[in-house]
Image (tube, rainbow, N blue to C red):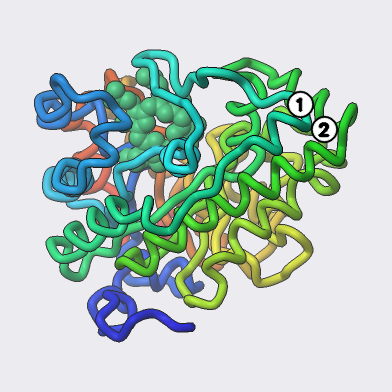
Amino acid sequence: DALPTTHPLADGRTAGSRLVRALRGDRPETLPVWFMRQAGRSLPEYRDLRVGTAMLDACLDPALASEITLQPVRRHGVDAGIFFSDIVVPIKLAGVDVEIVPGRGPVLGSPVRTAADVDALGRLEPEALAPISEAVARTVAELGSTPLIGFAGAPFTLAAYLVEGGPSKDHIRARTMMHADPETWSRLLDWAADVSGAFLRAQVLAGASAAQLFDSWVGSLSRADYVERVAPHSATALSHVADLGVPRIHFGVGSGEVLADMATVGGHADAVDAVGVDWRLPLDEAVRRVGTDVTVQGNIDPAMLAAPWDVLEAHVRSVVRRGGVARAHVVNLGHGVPPETDPDVLTRVVELVHSLGDGTDEA
Ligand code: CP3
């Protein structure tokens, strides 16, 4: 099983892009930059398009999802698109009653808390992913040599929403289930890993040139719990695209304690090509923890986007300088773009990063 010969990474369109080269360990003459949540509420053209359409309906409308994915690429000149969708899309397609409440996040009709609840989870039928494949195919046809990043939620982050029934601060119920009923926990994470893995695989087969696994809430776990009860399932999710040869990025928030484990997730030295680092950990310290066999991605503090330009510029230069000790660096934020961000500031950050060469002259 390899990529179709008409895939952008197989037919020569994106293999030489800054993003793909950096993820594979090369330092292109210009640093690649993109932003998590670059598509979304910071863009007036996004807010216009979304009027009257619920978030998850927008995700399942191929023309709309494709147009929203392309908006920030056109506006900012970033080095990658990230597919406009959500981590809960595949669980909805598997039959879970979930919606995204504006200003809050994913909310379930009924939480998944018992062995019987886990038994009752539905299957994700391959045909259900057709709108995702179509949206990706439309998008890469427009993107040309700019790579599209496909993504999925990691099993723990999905389970945190499933068990809690909505957003929560410390994911207490999920972490209790992990220890009170480890067998049910393991079955729930297996289900989530397969649903996420299928979602990721559909995006890659339809044209995504890289894949990012988001474990946004990994920071609420102890290292021991991460290694024993979570990481093997994240490795399963990533294994769904292993045969396709696209670079894989593994991102978490508050992940400092587990960053090295995320870089070799499930005990596989080659499970990921890059780790995404949040704003808490300086990149040179991140490199000390993960070594120089992986690329680092990050980690501009999203809070700095609203600071005066000279403060933001000094911060971006410092991020690039610290990233200079990594084998390669993909510049990004340490988490998503805040909705109130002035989009012109993002464009200016892209121009700044692109003026800094390969990132090793900032010393
Ligand atoms: O531009 C991109 O990064 C691609 C699109 C994307 C979205 N969600 C669109 C979205 C991606 C990669 C995600 C992933 C996602 N969704 C994560 C992991 C990344 C992260 O931010 O940690 C998580 C935890 C979710 C769950 C989720 N969905 C939350 C917490 C929210 C925010 C709720 C709110 O209103 O503040 C969403 C909704 C969501 N997903 C929006 C977007 C653009 C906002 C919805 C809107 O515009 O109405």
What is the three-letter code of the residue carrying label 1?
Thr
Q: Position of residue 240 (x, y in %)?
A: 56, 65
Within 8 Å of ligand 1, the CB of disc 2?
A: no
- As drawn, is 319 to the left or to the right of 356? right
Determine whether, in the image, residue 121 is placed left or right of residue 199.
Answer: right
Q: Which residue: 29% across, 28% down?
A: 55
- The location of residue 342, given as percent across then percent down, is 21, 24
Res. 224 image quadrant: top right
Is residue 303 visible to us here?
no
**Amino acid at dot 2:** Met
Q: As rendered, which of 3 and 27 lies closer to the eye?
A: 3
Q: Which residue is mark 2?
A: 178
Classed neighbour count for the residue bearing mark 1: other residues with Cα under 10 Å, few (<14), some (14–19), many (≥20):
some
Q: Secondary structure at mark 1?
A: loop
- Considering depth in this image, is 202 or 118 the residue closer to the camera? 118
- Which residue is under mark 1? 114
**In the rendered view, would you say 130 is above or below 230?**
below
**How many numbered marks have been drawn onto this rendered protein structure?**
2
Q: CA distance from mark 2 to mark 1?
A: 12 Å
Q: Residue at x 43, y 68 (%)?
A: 22
Q: Is residue 188 above or below residue 305?
A: below
Image location (x, y in percent) of residue 214:
53, 44
Left or right of 98: which side holds 9?
left
Seen at 27% across and 28% down, the residue is 309
